[in-house]
Amino acid sequence: MRVRSLGAVVVLAGSLVAVAPSAQAAAAPAVQITRVWYDSPGVDRRGNASLNAEYVRIKNTTRKAINLEEWVLHDKTGYKYLFGVLAIKPGKTITVRTGQGDSGTSTLFWGRRAYVWNNDADTAYLRRADGRPVDSCAYRATRSGYVDC
């Protein structure tokens, strides 16, 4: 899971020592997974409404549009959603829903007839077209059925 930290201060032998943040902690990704709703409300019967209540939200945190074409969203098992031609606008969020529907600029549909995100624990990964990791969000089950990353 991503850690956002500005650094730490450690007390050693009575003196203060500033510890610089790691490069990974200091540089938050430009595109972030902000929420995984892994346990859709109600009974899991694979109905399209239930499937679409399972989703991942992704946000562009920059001031410029970012092209997501051929980026991949996937879980630990290997279920993959391949983004088509799509640019996420500055500061905007897109939602990738598991089930079927008509995709637009802010909501995309995976088109599956079965659930992707495990209810007990899983990790959502976002990768660029060249396979480089962008962001991830790991979770363990909670009463709420979702995790904010």
Image (tube, rainbow, N blue to C red):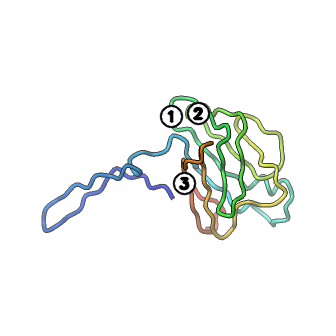
Residue occupied by mark 3 = 149
> Would you say the residues marked 1 and 2 are in contact, meaning their CB atoms lie under 8 Å apart?
yes
Question: Residue placed at 81% from the left, 65% from the top?
Answer: 44
Query: Which mark identifies residue 43?
Result: none
Query: Are there few (<14), some (14-19), or many (20+) residues within 10 Å of tag 3?
Result: some
Q: Quadrant of the C terminus?
A: bottom right
From the viewer's side, name the closer residue of 59 and 129. 129
From the viewer's side, name the closer residue of 67 and 48. 67
Q: Position of residue 15 (x, y in %)?
A: 13, 62
Whole-number angstrom distance, CA of label 1 to CA of label 3:
17 Å
From the viewer's side, name the closer residue of 23 and 95. 23
Query: Are there few (<14), some (14-19), or many (20+) residues within 10 Å of tag 1?
Result: some
What secondary structure is found at the residue carrying circle 3? loop
Residue occupied by mark 1 = 62
Q: Is residue 12 left or right of residue 120?
A: left
- Going from N to C along the chain, the mark reached first, 2 or 3, is 2
Q: Amino acid at mark 2?
A: Ile
Residue occupied by mark 2 = 66
- Going from N to C along the chain, the mark reached first, 1 or 3, is 1
Whole-number angstrom distance, CA of label 2 to CA of label 3:
20 Å
Q: Amino acid at mark 3?
A: Cys
